[in-house]
Image (tube, helix red, strand yellow):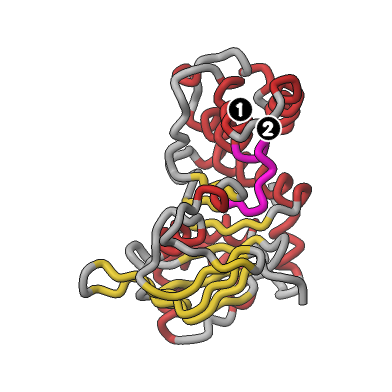
């Protein structure tokens, strides 16, 4: 078995006396796309912040590509090897081009190499014509495309997303999910993403982790999680959150799930 990108053991996060995250073990494999689903307050975003080295756990170990992370020291060298994207794009008040180029400049990429890399990712995300536009003039979907270009241009070893498409209208969201799926498969970058949208989980993920009460209640393929919940608690969550969606998928032959997941627009 190849070396894990992320390996977590005995992870615990407390806020005062309350345990908000309790993960005995989690492995994220190279090139894998892992979705984190669960109700509000279950600990999904907390886990993502810990993996992104933005939050120090109360106890436990986090390994990145085989190396243990020491949260008592600066994690910046490690964080520069990964990218985290949040619900809001958090773009700088300047042009699209300069936003996408910013991370390359901060990481010391040669000045003459930056334009070609930026333009390549603007083109791949279909926003090259917006290069000279100020970000304040962009729509929500355009802003998130800039955000994705700013992340991909850094060629990260891990990609972490916290519901980046939640505020977008359904057609815009669908287009972005389709394009993101293609880019993730093309680049092979290891990805962990939080979502409340089961369709996103089905379309993007290789595996789905259902987090309930800060613990992983089930970790399996999307097909298994949604068609064969491992516990009553997982079944109740799936039924409550996704009954209309699930009914349409249950009408499909089981062998059609993955084909539909990959091919749908």
Q: Residue at x 39, y 74 (%)?
A: 59
Identify which residue, 67 or 125, lies in the foreground: 67
Q: How many marks?
A: 2
Identify which residue, 153 or 247, lies in the foreground: 153
Residue projecting furthest to the front: 73
How far across and how far down the image is residue 203, in percent?
Answer: 65, 57
Label 2 sits on a secondary structure element that is loop
Which dot marks residue 125?
A: 2
Question: Residue tagged by mark 1?
Answer: 105
- Label whose residue precedes the other's in the sequence (1 or 2): 1
In the picture, residue 104 is in which quadrant? top right
Q: Is 201 rendered above or below residue 16?
A: above
Q: Residues within 10 Å of mark 1 (few under 14, many from 20)?
A: few
Q: Residue at x 57, y 20 (%)?
A: 98
Q: Is 203 rendered above or below residue 224?
A: above
Q: Does the magenta run of residues contain 154?
A: yes
Instruction: Magenta stretch: give its range.
Output: 151-159
């Amino acid at each position: 078995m190849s070396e894990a990108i992320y390996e977590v053991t005995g992870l615990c996060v407390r806020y005062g006396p309350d345990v908000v995250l309790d993960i005995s073990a989690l492995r994220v494999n190279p090139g894998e796309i892992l979705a984190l689903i669960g109700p509000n307050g279950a600990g999904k975003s907390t886990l993502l912040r810990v993996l992104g080295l933005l939050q120090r756990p109360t106890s436990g170990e986090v390994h990145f590509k085989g190396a243990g992370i020491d949260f008592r020291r600066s994690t910046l060298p490690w964080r520069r090897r990964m990218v985290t994207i949040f619900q809001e794009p958090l773009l700088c008040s300047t042009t699209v081009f300069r936003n996408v180029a910013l991370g390359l400049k901060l990481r010391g990429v040669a000045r003459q190499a930056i334009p070609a890399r930026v333009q390549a990712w603007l083109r791949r995300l279909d926003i090259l014509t917006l290069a000279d536009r100020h970000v304040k003039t962009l729509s929500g979907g355009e802003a998130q495309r800039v955000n994705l270009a700013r992340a991909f241009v850094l060629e990260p070893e891990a990609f972490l997303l916290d519901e980046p498409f939640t505020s977008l209208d359904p057609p815009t969201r669908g287009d972005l999910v389709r394009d993101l799926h293609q880019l993730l498969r093309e680049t092979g970058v290891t990805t962990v993403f939080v979502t409340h949208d089961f369709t996103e989980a089905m379309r993007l993920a290789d595996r789905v982790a259902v987090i309930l009460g800060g613990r992983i209640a089930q970790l399996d393929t999307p097909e298994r999680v949604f068609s064969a919940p491992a516990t009553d608690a997982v079944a109740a969550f799936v039924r409550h959150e996704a009954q209309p969606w699930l009914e349409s998928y249950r009408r499909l032959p089981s062998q059609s799930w993955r084909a539909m997941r990959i091919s749908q627009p």
